Amino acid sequence: MPDGLTVYVIDDDDAARDSLQFLLETAGLHAQTYETATAFLKNLPSPGSGCVITDVRMPGMTGIELLKTLKARAFPLPVIVITGHGDIPLAVDAMREGAADFLEKPYNDDALLQSIERAVASMKPAAENDDAKAAILQRIAELSGREAEVMTGLVAGKSNKVIAIELDISPRTVEIYRANVMSKMGADSLPALVRMAITAGLP
């Protein structure tokens, strides 16, 4: 991880915010915390090297609304969204709005630090992104028709049960296809799969 990174943490939960700050500073990162999205926008920092981490559900301005505001202001730092399990569709929408990543609660420390590293690395030359896109498209092309349909459902934030109903197959069969998709795509989590789909330009 590059030195000199500042991570801006926005979360209305005092304990979660303090815990995250402690983790970041223990990892050698500078952390600035805010209780609300509005407070962050009022003190919007000059973009340097780092990223923003925001919870999705907050009183007042939500994490998604913050993301859209930052996008409208052309704020260049990547944004990582923290979400509860039931907020996966919201998190997928956030990534389509430009979020660099999302993490499901509860997440482990290593997953968060890796997410920050990926987010910072996402600000790399377009040529490298083009290579990544081509590699992902090649993996998608190697999926079977049914696997591709299941992947489409997954990256839309749909549950196995909903995908099963839409494809008229059993939830257990969806689980098998889901495992195949994750393996063939080289994705170790749903957020990773969503990142791939968005990098590839999938609708």
Image (cartoon, helix red, strand yellow):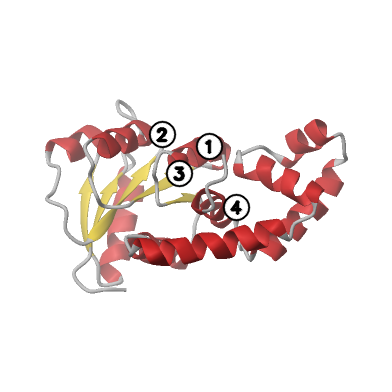
The label shown at residue 57 is 2
Mark nearer the N terminus (4 vs 2): 2
| Three-letter residue code for mark 2 | Arg
Q: Is residue 80 above or below residue 139?
A: above
Q: Circle 2 sits in a helix, a strand or a loop, which is it?
A: loop
Q: Residues within 10 Å of mark 4 (few under 14, many from 20)?
A: some
Mark nearer the N terminus (4 vs 3): 3
Q: Circle 4 sits in a helix, a strand or a loop, which is it?
A: helix
Q: Quadrant of the N terminus?
A: bottom left
Which residue occupies the foreground of this view, 126 or 193? 126
* Camera sees residue 164: yes
- The residue sitting at 61% across, 39% down in the picture is 157
> What whole-number distance in Å separates the C-alpha atoms at marks 4 and 1?
13 Å
What residue would you read off at disc 4?
190
> Is the residue under label 1 in contact with that under label 3 (CB below 8 Å)?
no
| Three-letter residue code for mark 3 | Met
Q: How many marks?
A: 4
What residue would you read off at disc 1?
87
> What whole-number distance in Å separates the C-alpha atoms at marks 2 and 1?
9 Å
- The residue sitting at 61% across, 38% down in the picture is 156
Mark nearer the N terminus (2 vs 1): 2
Report x, y in % for residue 9: 28, 50
What residue would you read off at disc 3?
95
> What whole-number distance in Å separates the C-alpha atoms at marks 3 and 1?
13 Å
- Give the image quarter of residue 19: bottom left
> Is the residue under label 1 in contact with that under label 2 (CB below 8 Å)?
yes
